[in-house]
Amino acid sequence: MELLPQTVWVIGIVFARVGALMMLAPGIGDQFVPPRARLMVALFLAFAIAPVVSSKIPPIPADMGGLFLAIGKEILIGLSLGLTTRILFSALATAGAIAGMQTGLGMAMAFDPSQQQQGAVFGTFLALLGTALVFQTDVHHLFLTGAARSFDNFLPGKPMPLGDMAQFSLQAFSQAFSLAIQITAPLLLFGIIINVALGIINRVAPAIQVFFIAQPVQVLLGIMLFAITAGAGMLVWLEAIATAGRSLN
């Protein structure tokens, strides 16, 4: 009974960090997943991680102010870790929007379950494909172990490394845009070539409604090119996600 308050405190600290991470983590943190399911997963993970990191958790604060401050720090750290992975997943939505514009299907919309709103049809497809790849290749295990290892990098009770966290988030933002460009690089080149060709044809023969005639060809060729190159682009993105997961460990 003397150890019970400290045990509950350890589990609560771990749950605060892991629960905040689960609220934003791709897949389990998507809006279509019920909040109770996310909280149950976070609670199970807290029970599994707590015995491993119990030696790193400081004693219970003497006053309520210190208690709420410690819990608030853990929630902020969890949100920062979850936001980083969510930023990398946003590269797929950006890539989908670029693919839609280059193929002439920029206005083709579909419901994106990860965003709970309408999105570009290519972005919805890439988001679902990315989630399936992460779980199929067990990359999500890297983030689960990273949640446990984060107690080595961000010790509870210590000052928050706001500079490192901000730099990590900025790197994730820049990497997300870079990944979106890499995924859609063939389509960007395709869009430049076909628009230059259509411009030349329209200049030579202005009486021909070249853009109206070429629209079906652009859509067909764009979809074919996307189908051929999407696999290679997703492998690049998956490697970047795996690298981010390994960096947490």
Image: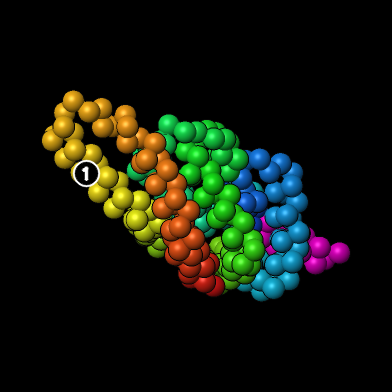
Instruction: Please say whether residue 17 is one of the residues in the magenta stretch.
Output: no
Left of 66 or right of it: where is 10? right
Task: Name the residue rendered at 16%, 28% in the picture.
Answer: 206
Spot occupied by residue 109 in the image (x, y as percentages of width and height): 50, 33
Task: Name the residue rendered at 74%, 66% in the picture.
Answer: 48
Nearest to the observer: residue 206 or residue 54: 206
Spot occupied by residue 42 in the image (x, y as percentages of width and height): 70, 55
Left of 47 or right of it: where is 242? left
Q: How many marks?
A: 1
Residue 190 shows up from this direction = yes
Q: Which residues are magenta?
A: 1-15
Q: Quadrant of the N terminus?
A: bottom right
Left of 150 or right of it: where is 170? left
**Main secondary-structure element of the magenta-colored stretch:** helix
Which residue, given by chain and number where applicable, does mark 1 sit on? 197
Residue 114 drawn above or below residue 137 = above
Q: Quadrant of the C terminus?
A: bottom right
